Image (cartoon, rainbow, N blue to C red):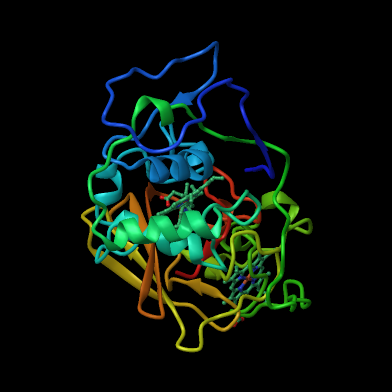
Amino acid sequence: MARSNVWLLLPIGVLVATGCGEGVDSAPKLEGGYTVDQSLPGMPCDISRLLNTRCNGCHGAPLKNSAPIPLVSRANLLERSQVDPSVTVGARSALRMRDTALSMPPARYPQPTEEEKAAFETWVAEGMPDGRCGEADAGVTVIEPVDAGPAPTVCSSNTFWTRGNDGSASMNPGFACRSCHLGQNFEGQNPNGDSERGRAFFFMGTVFPSLHEKNLCRSVVPSSGGTVEIIDAQGKVAATLMVNASGNFMSTSTRTTIAMPYTARVKANGRVRAMTTPQTDGDCNTCHTEQGRNDAPGRIVWP
Ligand code: HEC
Ligand code: HEC
Ligand code: HEC
């Protein structure tokens, strides 16, 4: 799915004032079709403003651009992270704002200032104390990302697979493995109609270092390796697949007895990155394409 590098600052002639007032019970003023967001429940002004201007164009209500979780109240930030249940969503948010490989907001979007990040970190470190923000500061404009075409793609390893369909477990990273092995021509990847049905394993895909890595680019794999876990409909880990040096992984059977739908997670370096949306198709790279399809944000990436 195409996402943007342009942010539209909606013109709303409101409110510049400093300092947080006492809690004022004022309904946000909605003007013709514009989203004016008020102070977020339970949050101090500076935190509200940071989230509204830098995050909630995606993490607002409704969620947009594949953002998985809302960040519109203190309660949201106090929840356990689905990615790392040992910490809160607030702590993950602080971390992702500093994550150079996987920054939040994504790298192409305007980033929070150093001051904003520091204020957020302090608030999280203090345990996210309940805060309020008065009417004067309430009129914060939510900045909506505007769709401006496909994201730029990269190849972090700078190394491409050049052996075509000369079979190997390291072949064609990023391509839809199972579709081709079944003789299909997903996104024009198999113009000659090659196939390898005996190895059309049910779960196949590639884990990459960043969201928009190019097709056929060899991954960069952590030195301690990594695994993909398939979690069945009952929430049990039903299979653990090794990721090889090219980033590829696969199961061992062309069929599966795993109770559907499944979810999945990637583990590496003691960290986890999870897909919480249930799926039934095991050909991961049909959704985790360069740009992402069917609401996937792009590639499967290391945690
Ligand atoms: C352009 C849309 C967009 C913006 C803006 C954005 N995010 Fe995200 N966010 C996403 C998407 C897509 C994902 C899921 C993929 C991922 O984790 O990279 C995500 C995932 C997350 C997660 C959950 C995953 C994790 O690693 O714990 C957190 C927390 C998060 N974002 C925080 C933020 C914060 C804080 C901001 C603002 C400072 C922000 N995001 C701005 C799109 C966005
Ligand atoms: C465009 C078609 C195509 C795509 C995409 C593709 N393959 Fe293959 N693959 C083949 C063909 C054809 C063979 C058998 C040809 C041969 O053995 O030389 C094969 C063979 C294999 C083999 C057997 C190698 C051996 O030991 O003989 C493995 C393992 C494999 N592929 C894994 C993958 C994985 C993992 C992916 C996705 C990241 C993938 N393939 C993507 C066409 C494809
Ligand atoms: C039908 C489409 C589809 C298929 C097939 C699919 N995914 Fe996803 N995946 C998504 C969507 C949509 C998201 C974003 C929402 C979420 O995180 O649940 C996602 C997110 C993820 C994430 C977290 C964010 C990221 O990009 O790292 C991981 C990890 C992941 N998928 C792994 C897998 C694995 C492993 C497979 C194959 C075994 C797979 N996915 C197959 C649609 C798909």
Residue 259 placement: quadrant: bottom left
Image coordinates of residue 78 in percent, x first then y, are 25, 51
Q: Using the image as rendered, state which of residue 281 and residue 5 is in the foreground.
A: 5
Q: Residue furthest top?
A: 32
Residue 46 vs 93, above or below: the answer is above
Q: Using the image as rendered, state which of residue 283 and residue 145 is in the foreground.
A: 145
Asked if residue 201 lies left or right of residue 238, the reply is right
Residue 36 vs 19, above or below: the answer is above
Q: Residue at x 49, y 59 (%)?
A: 97
Report the number of numbered marks. Answer: 0
Q: From this viewpoint, is residue 283 visible? A: no
Asked if residue 63 lies left or right of residue 176, the reply is left
Q: In the picture, which quadrant includes the N terminus? A: top right
Q: Using the image as rendered, state which of residue 107 and residue 285 is in the foreground.
A: 107
Q: Using the image as rendered, state which of residue 114 and residue 185 is in the foreground.
A: 114
Q: In the picture, which quadrant includes the C terminus? A: bottom left
Q: Residue at x 29, y 63 (%)?
A: 125
Image coordinates of residue 19 in percent, x first then y, are 39, 38
Q: Residue at x 57, y 71 (%)?
A: 209
Residue 136 placement: quadrant: top left
Q: Residue furthest bottom?
A: 223
Q: From this viewpoint, is residue 228 visible? A: yes
Image coordinates of residue 257 in percent, x first then y, are 31, 60
Residue 212 placement: quadrant: bottom right
Q: Residue at x 66, y 52 (%)?
A: 108
Image coordinates of residue 73 in percent, x first then y, are 31, 39
Residue 105 vs 10, above or below: the answer is below
